Amino acid sequence: MSYLESLRVFVRVVELGSITAGGRDLRLSPAVASNRVKDLEQRFGVRLLNRTTRKLTPTEIGRSFYDHARRVIDTLDEAEAMVSSFSGKPQGVIRLTAPLGLGRRLIAPLIPPFCEENPGIDIRLRLSDRSINIVEDAIDLAFFLGQPADSALKWRKIADCPRLLVASPDYLERHGTPSGPGDLADHNCLLLRYPRSPEYFWVLQTPDGPQKMMVKGRYDTDDGDVLRQWALNGHGIANRPLYEVDEDIREGRLVQVLPQTPPEVAQFGCLTPHRRLQDPKVRMFADMAVRELKRFF
């Protein structure tokens, strides 16, 4: 393995906080990844990482070396992107991330045909409903559902995504149907939550403007698909995007609750680090995804 490849291993190990995770991200075994880092330490005669049974952190010189190595890799990636833009044959790896349900339903089906048309490109898709640090995780393109915060990232809107409050007919028969937002306090609200999650309230559209409703429930999860399944099984009221539950509503498995005061519309789009904007393969995938995904909204 070349010196440059060892740099890539070291950078990902620092960013992901573990030899195993860094190696897995580059499709290397933990033993190989560990040897690459040791090779760098032997090359320079310094310790780059502090290792304990629970934690891996860069030493002071390791942090400085990481900053320089990250810039080297970014510069090389930009150079490769420039060359591929002239060759007309983009190649390399695109790292994508998306929320779980959205990623399974809408993003994952786009990948095989894209890769078949572009055999020089590999796709690595990571799905999570938790917040992801796009820069630290070296993500090229992040699909996002919600209200994007001010950011140094480039935001590209795809569509407005209506959200609905839904429950099963069985749940509503047993617990009653809310007639106004205030009635939600008497119901088991199914919540998407995780450490530092923003969803501790629902914002509903009312004739008087957006109204923040503090909601509670007996259980919550960090997986949106679990929320939908709990709602289908009659366990409470969920706040879900329309594309996820429209078929359930048409088939009568779920009923829209409080249709006169639905949740605020979410924005659906993608975020890109500015340094990736000119990468032809990232731009190609983003253009294709925007074109294909608009038909779902």
Image (tube, rainbow, N blue to C red):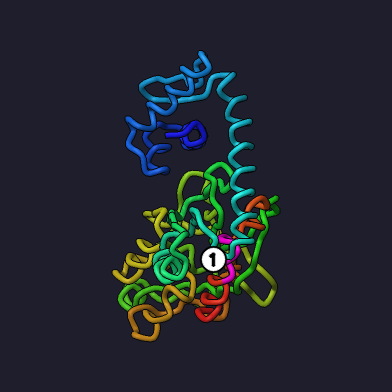
Give the magenta range.
280-287
Compare residues 58 and 255 and report the one nearer the observer.
58
The image position of residue 288, as x and y in percent, is 54, 72
Quadrant into which the N terminus falls? top left
Based on the picture, tell me whether residue 281 belongs to the magenta stretch: yes
Residue at point 54%, 63% (across, down): 89
Q: Position of residue 27 (x, y in %)?
A: 37, 44
What residue do we see at 62% from left, 73% from top?
A: 205
Q: Residue 226 magenta-drawn?
A: no
Image coordinates of residue 226 in percent, x first then y, are 35, 61
Residue drawn at x 50%, y 74% is: 164
- Residue 87, position as x, y percentages in the image: 59, 62
* Element under disc 1: helix
Nearer the observer, 162 or 207 = 162
Count of numbered tags: 1
The C terminus lies in quadrant? bottom right
Query: What amino acid is found at the position of numbered circle 1 in the picture?
Result: Phe
Viewer-nearest residue: 179 or 257: 257
**Mark 1 closeness class: few <14, some 14–19, many ≥20 residues within 10 Å:** some
Q: Picture quarter containing residue 81?
A: bottom right
**Quick check: can you spot residue 212?**
yes
Q: Which residue is mark 1?
A: 285
Task: Say left or right for 88 vs 128.
Answer: right
- Residue occupying the point 66% across, 57% down: 277
Q: Which of the two residues, 269 or 292, is positioned nearer the viewer here?
A: 292
1 shown above or below 295:
above
Locate residue 253: give its quadrant: bottom left
